Every structure is written in structure tokens, then in C-alpha cells.
Amino acid sequence: MRIITLILSFTIFVFASNNLANETSPYLLQPKENPVDWHPWSEEAFLKAKQENKLIFLSIGYSTCHWCHVMAHESFENEHFAKLLNKYFISIKVDREELPHIDAYYQKVYRTMHNKSGGWPLTIMMTADKKPFFSGTYVPLSAGYGSEGLINIINGVAVTSHQKLSQRGEKVLASMQLSQNIPNHKTPLHSDLAYRTINEFQSYYDFKNSGFSKQPKFPEASKIILLLKLYESRKNQESLDMALMTLDAMAKGGIYDQIEGGFYRYTVDEKWQIPHFEKMLYTNGELLEAYSLAYKHTKNPLYKKIIDETIAQMDKRFQIGGVYMSASNADSKNREGKNEEGFYFVYEHDEAFEYLKKRGLEKADIDAALAYLGIKEDGNFDGDLSNPHITEKVAPKNLKKAKEMLLEMRKTREYPFVDNKINTAWNALYIKGKFKAAIVDKKFILQAKKSLDALLEKMYVKGELYHQSIPNAKPTQKALLEDYAFLAATLFEAYQATLEQRYFELYIEIVGKSVTLFYKNGRWIESNDGFETYADISERAYASALAQQSINLLNYATVLADTKKFAMAKEITESFSGTINTNSSSHPTATLASLMFKYESVFIKSTKSNLERFDANDIKYPFVYKYLYDANEYLACKINSCFSYGTEFEKVKKDIESLLKR
């Protein structure tokens, strides 16, 4: 009878909802009925592991991650594997977008163990006291892909003593500790850091296909922005060329949605043709800034087109209540109702031809449009399917009409799942990009203002900033360093675009609070929630929050002549000076911050009417900003002094531009 009862109880357990049923994250809700007894990240889960003498199985991913879903379907929905996992482990599921600091820490664990970058899904096995002894990314259920398979790995762990596993974990943590220590002897930053950085970029830049790697290829907007700022600083043609070549290739490639607009997350090939079809809010936000900065120097109509289309697409698909959801999936339902990567976005040549023909387009026009968009009979994605990309220099005459029909064709399909989390940091990155896009159309200022105000209303409640929430729900998770850093940068940009004092006052407030919350004993931490992880200047999916914080503090210090904040800002770049000196191009935001110390931010101070008479983009100096001041003349000021003043703006402008000649 006891055996039967146990079997029945196990059966009920397998098919009942697990411990994720009450979570709000779409990613955590997706496996709520897995046979794996998942727990959210919590002290209760670790305590349970100690009480039951079990290990921890940690899986980190996000809702639009293709390989996360592959691993979930293959392993976590498998009852035999779930039974094995439940026997030896307490399993924890983490949404890396909800807890990016925890993901960042365990990505460092992976990097320490494998001497290379990880990714998602991230698979960690550790003891109940958080000593990691195994790390992997996608791990197949059975042996394959160079892996012995999850079942074999779990069985091997099961027959290994916890003491031995703990000893392995201690060695990993010891290596982690060494990597996180900041050198006692800070190295001076190279005086020729700009030229060293340009040379470093040239040493690995893909001059054949453009971009900063062979494959896969990520947009890496921070690197493009750094190259454009290097051009502004040194008028170095090579840095401009590398930036523009990359922007051109992406604009014409398959990483850009040629039918609707907006960028996918990355491509798996070296020619920018075959993307992983996720669209991320932060990717598009950072690229808006990059294309806007490039437009400033070139006035290239292609860049304006990309900016207009990207904003239109992101606003259509992601905007809700004035703010923005996080990401859309790579997969969508095919005609059989099964998830298929890229199904919504790709075309089969003959089907597309017939669709356009039935709608009255002439054969010659159809052939020209499909050829221009790279929609071929033999395809370039998964058999005879094609992902649109531009193949020719001159667009055919009826391309616009053909694209409208191809968009209609997409409307017969289901758009991919959109993760509805409202993430403060990512919203800030996108809204900042929209403010920057005002260089092509001033209408984006009003749009960005409305979104920023909506974000503040939802996520900055009674003086408390929150990290993320979902629509129609009150936020509960307190903000991280990245939320403060990127929101401050956006508030600063809002002030530059509007000269509304409220944005500057809130910028000062947010920067001040970030120091109180995240600067502890001379180090910056990523969160204030008890899981203490040190912030660093490494760039993951987007810009380094700590490096952005250095820029925030620098501008704060300069405009308010605050020497303490200036020293705090400089301490960040000096603490990582060895890394910046030896690998500056791989830490673009920190390198940009370092260059800002070299060239110095300049604030032009005057009345609102005076400041509205000129565009700071027209001044040939990389770091120049506006600041409201009760004086009829113009003053150009660095942190320690105002070096130029007068009633004639052209004279002050000339003095600022002359700084680059010294």
C-alpha cells in the first residue's frame, strides 16, 4: 500500500504546477507545468537543498531565447530526466532579464571554468552553499554536440561525494576571487589611447564583410559609437570607415528586417544574412544612437530611413501604455501550429512570386524585387526559404509596392511571442536612442518625452526606482545599478533635447541615489538585494552599466563643479586601467569614458533662448552639452573653469573647437 501511495503522490507531483506558478516573469511561467520541480531564485530554495542534502541545478535563460526552448522541450519536459533531476537536485530557474546581476555572476563562473564567454541557456550545478562545480550552456539530453549529455552528467554527479564536488567548487570560487580583485597599483592610461584603440580595432576588423568578428556577428553598437567618437576626437578616417562600413552592411543585410524594419539580435553567418530572429529592445535602442551619430557626420538618407523604420516598427510591436516591452521571439507558429524559427519572417520564392502575381504585379517587377531582396529559389535559410537582404546597389522601380505586398503576406502568419516585461534599463536605452534620433526629425523629441514620463510614472514610485514589471501591475523588484545608470543617461539626454529643468533635477537625484545604493567600501555592486556582485566594465548584450555610471558622474561633476563626484568617476576608469590599456576596443563604453576625461566635457551655459539658437551637434567637439544659466552671454566651461565667454556664439564655438588642436 505504501508503494502505491508513493507512486500516486509522485504522479500528482509530476503533473501539478511547480513552484513557478505564482511568478510574473513570462519566462518563469513558461515551464510552470514542467515535471521538473522548478523553484524561483530564493533563499528558501537553497535552504531546502541543505535540509534535503541535495545539490542545486541552476538554469538561466529568457523567454525569447531559441536554445532555451530547445533545451526545455528536449530535457525539462522529459519525465524520465525530470525524475532523475528531482531526485538529486533542487532546480532553480532564473530569468536573466529579471535578475541580470545573478546571470552576470554565473557567466563569470562559466568564463572562469572554460576561459571563454558563455551564453544562454546557462547551466550551472553547485552545492547548496553556492559552490559551482559544473557549468555549460545548451547541453543536450543525450551524448552529442561534443557533450556527454545531461543524463550521463547527472548520473556521474550522483555517484560523486558532495565533499569532492564542494572541493571542486571551492577552486572555482578561488579563481573567481582572483579575477574580481582590483589591482592595488593602478596603471596610468596610455596618453595615445585613441590611436591604440583604432589600431586594435583594425587588427581584427572584418574588412571583407564588415563587423567585429567572423561569425556569429553581433551589432555591438557601443563599438560603433566609440569609433564615431574617435573620429570626432582625432578626425581619423579609418575609425569613421569601420563604423560606416558596419552600419551600411547591417542596414542592407539580413540582420535588419527589410520588410518591416528593426534589427534582429545577431546573425550566425559572417555576411550579416542569416539572423537569429529575436528582436530586442536594447539592441534597437543602442543602434538608434549609433545610426543617429553616423547621420550627424554623413547626412546619409539610408541612415534616416533605418531610424524612421526602426522606430515605427518598435513602437508598433513593443509599445504599451507609452512604455516598451522587452523582446520578441525568434520562433513563431507555422502552418502546423508548431514553433519554427524565423517562420514569420522568411519567404519561399515560388510562393512569394505567386502571391505578388495574384495582386497584379508584373513578372519583370516581381523578378526584380525578389532578386533585389535576395529571395531566391534555392534560398539562404533552411532549405528553399530566404531571409530578405539587399543584394544590389540600385532598387527596382516597384520595390515599395512589392514590399507592401510581402508585408501583407506576413499578415497571414502569427507574429512571434512578445515578452511583455517592462524593463527600466532597456526602456531607458531605447528612449535615449529616440532622443538621439531627433537629429533626423524633431518629432522624436516629443515621442521620447512621453515615453520617458510614462516610464517614470510606472517605475519611479514615491522616490523608489524599480527594475521591471509587467503591464497593469505594480512593480515590486527594486532597481539595479544598470537601471539607475541608463535612466540617468536618458534623463541627461532629455535635458539636452528639451532644456526642461525637471529632467536635470531628476538626473541629479538619480545619480545621487545610485551612489548611496551601489557604492560600497570603494567598490560598485550591481544590486542591493543581498546577492552581492561587483560591477565591472565588461560589455555583455549591451553597454556596461558601470562604465555608463562613470560618464554620468563625470557630467554631473563637470556641470556642478563637484570634485568628489569627479574623483569617483575617474576612480572607475583608473581601477580598470590595465584592462582598458590592453583591450580598449572590447570595453568600448569604458574607453569612451576614458576619452572623456582626456578631452573633457564642455558645457555651454546661457539662457534658454540663447541655447535654443544653436544645435550642439554642429560644434566640432565630441563632448559638448548645454546648461541653463542666468546670463545673457555664452560661457563655455570645463570642471575647473570657464575658458570662453561672450555675446557672440560663433566666437565661443570657435574656442571650443580649438581645444582639439592643442
Image (tube, helix red, strand yellow):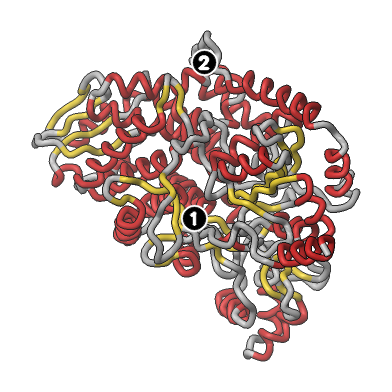
Q: Which mark is residue 303?
A: 1
Where disc 2 sits, the SS reads loop
Q: Residue at x 42, y 67 (%)?
A: 320
Residue 130 lies, in percent from the top left, at 65, 33
Q: Quadrant of the N terminus?
A: bottom right
Tally of numbered tags:
2
In the displayed orientation, state which residue is furthest to the top: 185
Amino acid type indicated by mark 1: Tyr
Picture coordinates of residue 226, whole percent (x, y): 50, 35
Q: Type of residue at label 2? A: His
Which residue is labeled 2 in the image?
190
* Front-lying residue, 566 or 83: 83
For label 2, the crowd category at 10 Å Cα-Cα, with few meaning under 14, some 14 to 19 and many 20 or more, is some
Q: Quadrant of the C terminus?
A: top left
Distance in Å between CA atoms under marks 2 and 1: 34 Å
Q: Position of residue 161 (x, y in %)?
A: 83, 31
**Quadrant of the rendered image containing residue 204:** top right
Residue 41 appearing in the image: yes
Image check: 135 left or right of 244?
Answer: right
Residue at the image position 34 percent from the left and 28 percent from the top: 554
Q: Residue at the location (73% across, 52% down)?
A: 268
Compare marks 2 and 1 and give the one earlier in the sequence.
2
User: Toward the viewer: 115 or 167?
Assistant: 167
Q: Horizontal placement of 346 versus 602: left or right? A: right
Badge number at residue 442 = none
Vertical order, 209 against 658 (above or below): below
